[in-house]
């Protein structure tokens, strides 16, 4: 969260991606020492920088965190999640160049691919994730 010039608190703008590979979703495990949402599985993504639009931020964040290159999303986010301290836009990503790796070990201590059955066993960063993942994995894949 940032403080605006008038002293009020601004909600952080966050972008994230659901990377789907067939019947699996890629998640990142946030390190236990993180200030916000420690020791949970979360989507790759991060903060939108000042003067940056969300689609551009998503491309940058996926390159920084996973070492992959994705096309900039042309449509609206598939889901938006709001909380007291942030507003997050989430896009479905099904194509990328490169092999996802944990390119941000200071933020995540692991990344992994999870099937629908495995997702229910994880501590997820947000309550709405499991329903969203189930819906994404249940969609007909091209």
Image (cartoon, rainbow, N blue to C red):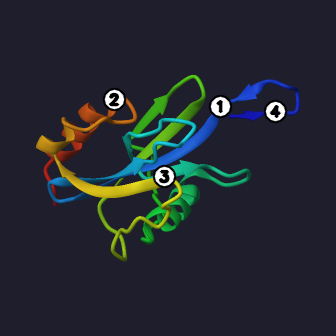
Which residue shows up at 14% across the image and 54% down it?
23
For residue 113, side relative to residue 57 (left or right): left
Q: Write down the residue under mark 3.
A: 45
Q: Label 2 neighbourhood size at 10 Å, few (<14), some (14-19), many (20+)? A: few
Disc with the residue nearer the chain's start (2 vs 1): 1
Q: Write down the residue under mark 4.
A: 4
Disc with the residue nearer the chain's start (3 vs 1): 1
Q: Label 4 neighbourhood size at 10 Å, few (<14), some (14-19), many (20+)? A: few
Circles 4 and 3: CB atoms closer than 8 Å: no
Q: Label 1 neighbourhood size at 10 Å, few (<14), some (14-19), many (20+)? A: some
Quadrant of the drawing holding the C terminus: bottom left
Disc with the residue nearer the chain's start (2 vs 3): 3
CA separation in Å, label 4 and label 2: 29 Å
Q: Label 3 neighbourhood size at 10 Å, few (<14), some (14-19), many (20+)? A: many
**Mark sitting on residue 11:** 1
Vertical comparison of 2 with 68: above or below:
above
CA separation in Å, label 3 and label 1: 16 Å
Question: What is the residue that sits farthest to the bottom in this orientation?
Answer: 98
Disc with the residue nearer the chain's start (4 vs 1): 4
Residue 10, quarter of picture: top right
CA separation in Å, label 2 and label 1: 19 Å
SS at badge 4: loop
SS at badge 1: loop
SS at badge 2: loop
Residue 86 position within the rendered picture, expressed as x and y whole percent measured from the top left: 58, 32
For residue 81, side relative to residue 121 (left or right): right
Circles 2 and 1: CB atoms closer than 8 Å: no
**Mark sitting on residue 128:** 2
CA separation in Å, label 4 and label 3: 23 Å
């Amino acid at each position: 969260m940032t403080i605006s010039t008038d002293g009020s608190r601004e909600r952080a703008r966050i972008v994230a991606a659901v990377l789907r590979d067939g019947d699996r979703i890629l998640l990142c495990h946030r390190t236990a020492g993180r200030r916000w949402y420690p020791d949970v599985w979360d989507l790759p993504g991060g903060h939108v920088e000042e003067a940056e639009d969300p689609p551009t931020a998503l491309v940058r964040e996926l390159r920084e965190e996973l070492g992959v290159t994705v096309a900039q999303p042309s449509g609206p986010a598939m889901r938006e999640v709001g909380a007291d301290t942030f507003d997050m836009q989430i896009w479905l990503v099904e194509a990328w160049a490169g092999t996802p790796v944990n390119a941000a070990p200071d933020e995540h201590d692991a990344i992994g691919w999870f099937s629908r059955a495995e997702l229910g066993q994880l501590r997820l960063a947000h309550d709405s994730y499991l329903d969203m993942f189930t819906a994404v994995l249940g969609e007909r894949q091209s």
